[in-house]
Image: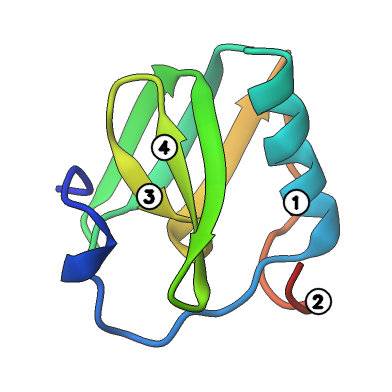
Amino acid sequence: MGTREEDSLSDAYEPVQCSFHDVLEDAAVRRRTCVIRYRDEDGTPHEASTTIRDIYARDGAEYARLGNGTVVRLDRLDDVESAGAPAPTQRGGGSR
């Protein structure tokens, strides 16, 4: 359900766009509560209203640790709304 660490994620990581990464970093630094829509490792959609505690890279992929304890691989984030503005499309555009 997205709460397990990255060890359970076996499919290839697709880097997110730099502009989307910037939105995530900004939300994390400012500790903004966001509406975050994501898919877990089984593809099941989830929505959480929480903060982004940390963004980090490990084993060739990037992850967001949410304020509720969930860890989400960045390419599984479908949308992050912060201060009422949806984030730009995140897929493609190279890695950071």
Tag 2 secondary structure: loop
Query: Which residue extends farthest front?
Result: 58
Q: Please give the residue where the numbered disc 1 appears in the rendered image.
A: 20
Task: Name the disc covering residue 72, or none.
Answer: 3
Q: Please give the residue where the numbered disc 4 appears in the rendered image.
A: 65
Inspect the image, locate mark 1, and give the three-letter code of the amino acid beneath it. Phe
In percent of the image, x 47 and y 79: which residue is there? 13
Tag 3 secondary structure: strand
Q: Earlier in the sequence, mark 1 or mark 4?
A: 1
In percent of the image, x 56 and y 20: which residue is there? 34
> Alpha carbon of mark 1 to alpha carbon of mark 4: how far?
16 Å
Query: Which residue extends farthest right?
Result: 19
Task: Return the residue nearer the eye: 85 or 31.
Answer: 31
Judged left or right of residue 37, residue 92 is right
**Whether residue 51 is situated above or below residue 4 in the rendered picture:** above
User: Which quarter of the figure is the C terminus placed in?
Assistant: bottom right
Tags 1 and 2 touching, CB below 8 Å: yes
Judged left or right of residue 5, residue 26 is right
Q: Earlier in the sequence, mark 3 or mark 4?
A: 4
Name the image quarter holding residue 14: bottom right
Q: Which of marks 1 and 2 is nearer the N terminus?
A: 1
Tag 4 secondary structure: strand
> Alpha carbon of mark 3 to alpha carbon of mark 1: how far?
15 Å
Q: Please give the residue where the numbered disc 2 appears in the rendered image.
A: 93
Q: How is the image coloured?
A: rainbow
Tag 1 secondary structure: helix
What is the x, y in percent for residue 42? 17, 67
> Alpha carbon of mark 4 to alpha carbon of mark 2: how far?
22 Å
Q: Earlier in the sequence, mark 2 or mark 3?
A: 3
